[in-house]
Image: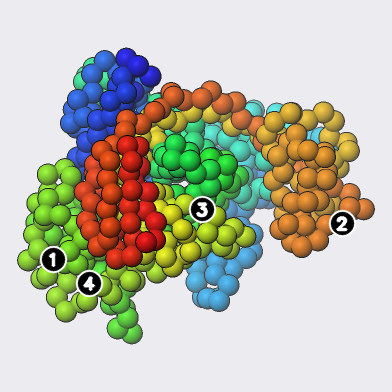
Amino acid sequence: MSGVAVLGIDVGGTFTDAVLLEGGRLSTAKVPTAREQEESVVAAARAVGAAAIERFTHGTTVATNALLERKGARTAFVATEGFEHLLFLRRQARPHLYRPCRDHPEPLVPLERCVGVRERVGPGGVLVPLDLSTLPGLDADAVAICLLFSFRDPTHERAVAAEVRRRLPRAHVVASHEVAPEFREYERASTTVADAYLGPVVARYLRALRDRCAAEGLPEPLVLRSSGGVATIEEASAHPATILVSGPTGGVVGAALAARLAGFERAISFDMGGTSTDVCLIVGGRAERSAERLVGGLPIRLPSVDVHTVGAGGGSLVWRDAGGALRVGPESAGADPGPACYGRGGERGTVTDANLLLGRLPQRLPGGIELDRGAAERALRDLDPGAVVEVVDAEMLRALRLVSVERGHDPREFALVAFGGAGPLHACSLAEQLGCETVLVPAAAGVLSALGLVASDERRDRVRTYVVPLEEAGELPESGEADLRYRGQSFELAVPLGAGGGIAEAFHRAHEERYGYADRGRQIELVAVRTAEVVPGPHVELPPGDPLDVRGPEVVELAGATCWIPPGWVGVRDGYSTLVLTRA
């Protein structure tokens, strides 16, 4: 890395973080997030002193926010005739097991803009020829196309997409085989619709960002995908559903790097920012990945780092419910006005205000924010700040248990990597309750997501659907994952290709480990094969930090974060960049 300047900028709900790594020297900066995210990116680049940059990677929440806030494009949906209601039929499952009256989230496309075209492809080929004259007129800025069995034969879907593009040359058109060529029509349709819905919004932002960066003399940024790899601006604009978890993914990449450099191959990433907390399991030095996730209650069938998010952060608002119980989040004070103690007009109490009153924060935060203790007292009024912290800890503990204990992992075998502006404030308490023996706090904890952007790989994920008996699948790739199931089962397990003893035996073992039994006499069905082309990112060696030996209770100020070491914990940093916390 000597002599090469690499920049990573992550935009969060409260702060925008920048990390510049140049010739072994690490520089960091935090600036408040502006309403126009591209302005925050440029301000962070200026603050960190970026110049003559060779590689610039960006993590953004634009796609996530647009989906959650339903601020995407006016979208139409084209399906096989007779399947126009697909987005509304879903899977016919309750949205919540014990709340029968709870509603599903509304589809992104209203029923009046869901149309059908006459055609039908079956597993063996064309059943009904495509008739483009049956395609109704469309009034939309984006169009999603999802035809039956297009994952196996996309010929009809390509023809429909070409016709729509001819009719609506300015619309953003996405066909399902381009973004999620997998079976299960509802999940494929949901993913395609989200991709089309987000296209115009994300493209506007990314192109505005490219123009602002060019005006500042910065190179065109790469955008972090949900899978942990990077994409060009044009690639991300074409398929924005691939960057829905862009921001949290950078933190997981950074946590895996910090844990690996500290000698821990098994870790739990714990990123607590201003508006939310993201957690993820790291095994063998790499983050766990999933083929599907829910975003805003909608299934997105795309590879992503398996991050679990809860609405609990430093800016989470404190309130009482109808029964008088103390609650925290998911609503947040955000960057404007921010927590009451920021002195920017916030009047409602937050987790940050509680931590200030408990003596766990310095008078001045990174980014130049002077904290107002009186404002925090007025905002919380008669609320016990200790109780506020206990409530938010309980919410985050549930998330940590979900990715570890509830998936069969013993937290005692994992280190907890705490980062984000607020993560190190809560890490030791959570580790005690979870059973983790070690907490790792990187020196760059407050900007670790941006550091993860610096170190991210170039990654291209691909999937091929089979849905055939395993013995009929033919030759398979040497690396990647296979989705397998016993014939007749509804869901599958992912098994590494090239596993010792053969892929069939690897599946039997995985099934026995997950469900407690294996049926070696039953036929195995290959559902899909997932592969990835990976070009490793820049080699990153963190500069050593100042030696530190500290015993709780103690407040330790870091670059962009504050670490609270409670009584009974000790911390050691013996020249490396990460503070290692253990029980005394």
Residue identified by numbered label 1: 376
Q: What residue type is labelled 4?
A: Pro
Q: Are marks 1 and 3 in contact (CB under 8 Å)?
A: no
Please rate how many residues cluster around mark 2, counting C-alpha atoms within 10 Å: few if below 14, some from 14 to 19, many from 20: few
Q: Distance between the residues labelled 1 and 4?
A: 10 Å
> The N terminus is located in which quarter?
top left
Precedes in sequence: disc 3 or disc 2: 3
Q: Residue at x 53, y 40 (%)?
A: 285
Please rate how many residues cluster around mark 1, counting C-alpha atoms within 10 Å: few if below 14, some from 14 to 19, many from 20: many
Residue identified by numbered label 4: 385
Q: Do the residues labelled 3 and 2 touch (CB within 8 Å)?
A: no
Q: Which of 298 and 6 is in front in this view?
A: 6
User: Which is closer to the viewer, label 1 or label 4?
Assistant: 4
Precedes in sequence: disc 4 or disc 3: 4
Q: How far apart are marks 4 and 3 (CA)?
A: 30 Å
SS class of the residue under badge 3? loop
